[in-house]
């Protein structure tokens, strides 16, 4: 009788032919082989996701935005006040601009003690990457809004700086004419 094996289940053990210790060792060896095959598939899938995000990152770098924005991906909160927040953003980490993930864990009673970790997208834990992918369009919309707001603020500050510059020019001209 042939037994069909899949990579998801270990081979059946015939208790009459092997000792319990031998069975356990054989099962561990089979589990490890199956885990190795699963790891290859996991890494290939993760690499494909990473390549797509690198392409998006490269397209954003061309725009030379130089602005940071974050959007919420998920929130968890328990009755004791412990919370966890996952965010997707565009920011500068380690001197490099890119799509990033942030995990914030803390307790509402001690907000200053919150643990904050952030990574560029492909350096983040896989679970966070998977969770955040669907929020990329929302991140792009957030970047549009932030770019527009920042442009408006720069225009306002440029007008103010021009007025200051003109006042200093007048004062410098008056000082020169007094000498």
Image (cartoon, rainbow, N blue to C red):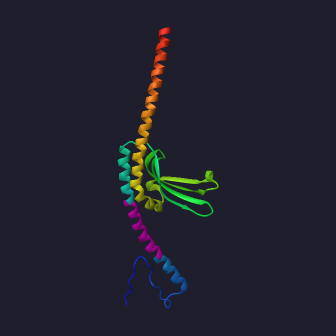
Q: Residue 48's spot in the image, x, y percent?
A: 37, 60
Q: Residue 9's spot in the image, x, y percent?
A: 44, 79
Image quadrant of residue 42? bottom left
- Residue occupying the far right of the picture: 109
Q: Nearer the viewer, residue 133 or 30?
A: 133
Residue at 35% x, 48% y: name it. 59
Q: Quadrant of the N terminus?
A: bottom left
Q: Residue 3's spot in the image, x, y percent?
A: 39, 86
Q: Which residues are magenta?
A: 31-48
Verify whether residue 40 appears in magenta: yes
Taking 150 as reference, is 111 above or below it? Answer: below
Q: Residue 28's spot in the image, x, y percent?
A: 50, 77
Taking 7 as reference, is 3 above or below it? Answer: below
Image quadrant of residue 41? bottom left
- Residue occupying the far top of the picture: 179
Q: Nearer the viewer, residue 40 or 71?
A: 71
Residue at 41% x, 38% y: name it. 151
Residue at 40% x, 62% y: name it. 46
Image quadrant of residue 2? bottom left
Main secondary structure type of the part rendered in magenta:
helix
Verify whether residue 125 appears in magenta: no
Taking 10 as reference, is 137 above or below it? Answer: above
Taking 30 as reference, is 52 above or below it? Answer: above
In the shown orientation, is residue 50 left or right of residue 18? left
């Amino acid at each position: 009788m042939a037994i069909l094996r899949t990579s998801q289940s270990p081979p059946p053990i015939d208790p009459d032919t092997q000792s319990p210790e031998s069975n356990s060792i054989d099962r561990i060896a089979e589990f490890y082989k199956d885990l190795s095959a699963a790891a290859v598939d996991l890494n290939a899938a993760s690499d494909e996701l990473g390549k797509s995000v690198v392409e998006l990152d490269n397209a954003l770098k061309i725009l030379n935005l130089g602005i940071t924005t974050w959007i919420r991906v998920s929130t968890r909160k328990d009755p004791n006040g412990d919370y966890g927040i996952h965010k997707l953003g565009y920011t500068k980490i380690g001197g490099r601009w890119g799509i990033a993930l942030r995990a914030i864990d803390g307790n509402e009673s001690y907000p200053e003690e919150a643990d904050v970790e952030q990574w560029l997208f492909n350096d983040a834990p896989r679970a966070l990457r998977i969770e955040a992918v669907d929020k990329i369009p929302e991140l792009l919309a957030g970047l549009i809004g932030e770019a527009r707001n920042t442009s408006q603020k720069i225009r306002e500050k440029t007008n103010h700086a021009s007025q200051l510059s003109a006042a200093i020019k007048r004062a410098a001209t008056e000082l020169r004419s007094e000498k």
